[in-house]
């Protein structure tokens, strides 16, 4: 009986884990949101369906034989699994098919000749004595049973700095795992990937290394590691959400939470690709739940405040001096010190840079940066080449404040699809007036505790210490009508298209006193006086000598841009 038991155990121990190099991910499409793989990545990389012989598919990987690391692994979260804290011990697997060996088995490296394997994939020796971990893309802690074992393959790992992998990245994995475990019935799709560096590979040859001891410069070290999460609720689609996060593969790296569109944009830049898209339709990125989860991660695990801010040495010393009283075994103050106020200014070299940063900041952190210094001259703007090139244009200075929007349960953000500012009130979307400035159109400062906004009126304004004043409306920049042929000039940065006490919208277009009637947005659906062209009748000549359109209020008006 003992011999039989040992024989059965030996057979079970040798049951191979399987992986298959495929032409497309059709055989393991279930690990991708809507069955669609990420777009915009290396089309020459190998597609692998990671599976066991008798266990079915467990996840999918896109593997670069040039870099000898995966570009991503796509998987679903084992929500019903409750033993995810355990670890597998033993060998890491390799993929024989990548090296031209006719076998579907994902097997231990020791079963094959190393020289044969090394041509197109990493081996365990590449990681030894390098300071880099074999970092999981599909984490073993997100799976259970055979699914966990299947994650221990070098086609699912990339060189990660040991501190980054074991501390910073693990902290985010644990936080995401906590969020996903608490969800109701649904499916969580995840994609975790790498950005290969241009020329840094391991192992590096040291001063005293024997060149013949092993091959050097084989496995590319990623500059960045990223992950994207897409949760689809089976109960209520309004509970669905998505988010992403990305960090430098370095010991003291900051890992930053992102919306999926933001992550797509950053990866497009890092990969030098035209249009990276991780999830088809960005997976509910406009749902209020997405903003809620981004803010939750930002507030719970984003790097500490003192690491995010560039504090002067004096301010940092003052702060630490106050807090250090509670670290010493001496008589302590009767009450803990309280931070009663923090004043932080930021500078931007263009309106567009400020606008983009404010949109992101509000979404992620719930803070905004209101324009806090009067303009004394032109402001750089990508909307106007003439102003953009001026050497005397000044920087924008804004002050960080908590975002407060009455009646809103989400941030007040500009949405291009509706050409206006919107927020959510519970599950309903509504108009909102963003916090964006405390400087009026005449250069006065708003009264303390008051910011520019519509505040129940058609125009933007605020109280000042002596009375009240109009404010220049927030971006996007308006454009003048010109000669009604699409030749109008952009509005001045500090005098955007608005009402300013008139029955029509107007703005100054330069600093010489020239003004024009204006459209609030430079697109072919924006008409004069804040009107909107009908969706089936965009701005055009329509047989006349001027631009016009039928408007959504049942009338017509002049417009500015075809």
Image (spheres, rainbow, N blue to C red):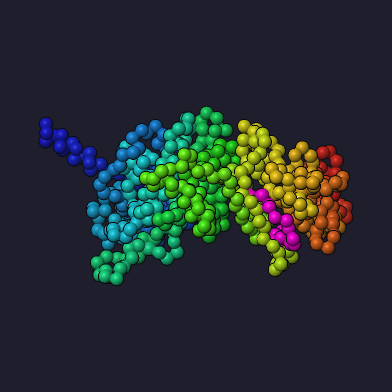
- Which quadrant: the N terminus? top left
Asked if the stretch drawn in magenta spans residue 222, the answer is no
For residue 388, which quarter of the picture?
bottom right
Q: Which x, y percent locates residue 193? A: 44, 51
Magenta extent: 369-385
Q: Considering depth in this image, is 431 or 200 the residue closer to the camera?
A: 431
Q: Is residue 22 left or right of residue 428?
A: left
Q: Is residue 270 left or right of residue 4?
A: right
For residue 224, which quarter of the picture?
bottom left
Q: Residue at x 50, y 58 (%)?
A: 313
Q: Residue furthest front?
A: 331
Q: Which x, y percent locates residue 214? A: 27, 65
Q: Residue furthest top?
A: 235
Q: Considering depth in this image, is 56 or 145 the residue closer to the camera?
A: 145
Q: Which x, y percent locates residue 356? A: 63, 52
Q: Residue at x 65, y 44 (%)?
A: 413
Q: Considering depth in this image, is 192 or 543 the residue closer to the camera?
A: 192
């Amino acid at each position: 009986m003992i011999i039989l038991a040992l024989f059965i155990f030996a057979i079970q121990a040798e049951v191979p884990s399987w992986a298959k190099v495929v032409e497309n991910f059709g055989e393991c499409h279930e690990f991708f949101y809507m069955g669609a793989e990420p777009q915009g990545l290396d089309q020459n990389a190998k597609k692998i369906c990671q599976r066991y012989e008798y266990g079915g598919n467990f996840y999918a990987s896109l593997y670069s034989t040039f870099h000898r690391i995966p570009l991503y692994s796509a998987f679903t979260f084992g929500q019903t699994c409750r033993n995810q804290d355990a670890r597998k011990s033993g060998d890491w697997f390799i993929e024989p098919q990548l090296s031209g060996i006719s076998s579907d088995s994902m097997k231990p490296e020791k079963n094959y000749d190393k020289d044969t394997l090394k041509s197109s994939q990493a081996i365990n020796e590449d990681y030894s004595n390098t300071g880099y971990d074999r970092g999981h893309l599909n984490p073993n802690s997100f799976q259970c049973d055979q699914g966990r074992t299947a994650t221990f393959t070098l086609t699912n790992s990339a060189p990660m700095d040991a501190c980054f992998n074991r501390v910073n990245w693990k902290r985010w994995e644990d936080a995401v795992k906590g969020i996903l475990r608490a969800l109701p019935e649904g499916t969580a799709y995840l994609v975790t990937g790498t950005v290969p560096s241009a020329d840094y590979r391991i192992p590096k040859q040291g001063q005293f290394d024997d060149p013949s001891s092993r091959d050097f410069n084989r496995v590319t070290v990623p500059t960045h590691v990223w992950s994207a999460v897409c949760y689809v609720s089976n109960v209520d689609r309004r509970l669905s959400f998505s988010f992403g996060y990305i960090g430098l593969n370095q010991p003291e790296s900051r890992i930053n939470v992102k919306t999926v569109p933001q992550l797509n944009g950053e990866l497009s830049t890092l990969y030098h690709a035209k249009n990276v898209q991780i999830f088809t339709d960005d997976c509910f990125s406009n749902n209020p739940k997405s903003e809620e989860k981004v803010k939750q991660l930002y507030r719970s695990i984003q790097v500490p405040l003192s690491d995010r801010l560039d504090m002067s040495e004096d301010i940092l010393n003052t702060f630490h001096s106050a807090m250090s009283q509670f670290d010493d075994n001496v008589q302590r103050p009767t009450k803990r010190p309280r931070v009663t106020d923090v004043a932080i200014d930021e500078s931007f070299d263009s309106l567009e840079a400020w606008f983009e940063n404010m949109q992101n900041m509000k979404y992620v952190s719930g803070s905004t940066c209101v324009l806090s210094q009067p303009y004394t001259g032109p402001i750089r703007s990508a909307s106007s080449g003439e102003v953009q090139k001026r050497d005397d244009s000044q920087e924008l200075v804004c002050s960080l404040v908590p975002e407060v929007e009455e009646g809103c349960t989400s941030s007040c953000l500009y949405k291009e699809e509706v050409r206006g500012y919107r927020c959510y009130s519970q599950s309903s979307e509504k108009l909102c007036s963003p916090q964006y400035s405390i400087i009026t159109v005449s250069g006065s400062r708003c009264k303390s505790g008051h910011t520019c906004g519509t505040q129940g009126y058609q125009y933007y304004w605020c109280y000042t210490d002596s009375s009240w004043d109009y404010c220049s409306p927030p971006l996007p920049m308006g454009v003048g009508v010109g000669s009604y042929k699409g030749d109008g000039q952009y509005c001045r940065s500090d005098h955007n298209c608005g009402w300013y006490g008139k029955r029509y919208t107007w703005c100054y277009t330069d600093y010489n006193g020239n003004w024009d009637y204006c459209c609030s947005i430079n697109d072919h659906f924006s008409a004069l006086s804040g009107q909107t062209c009908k969706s089936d009748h965009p701005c055009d000549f329509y047989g006349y000598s001027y631009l016009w359109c039928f408007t959504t209020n049942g009338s017509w008006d002049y417009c500015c841009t075809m």
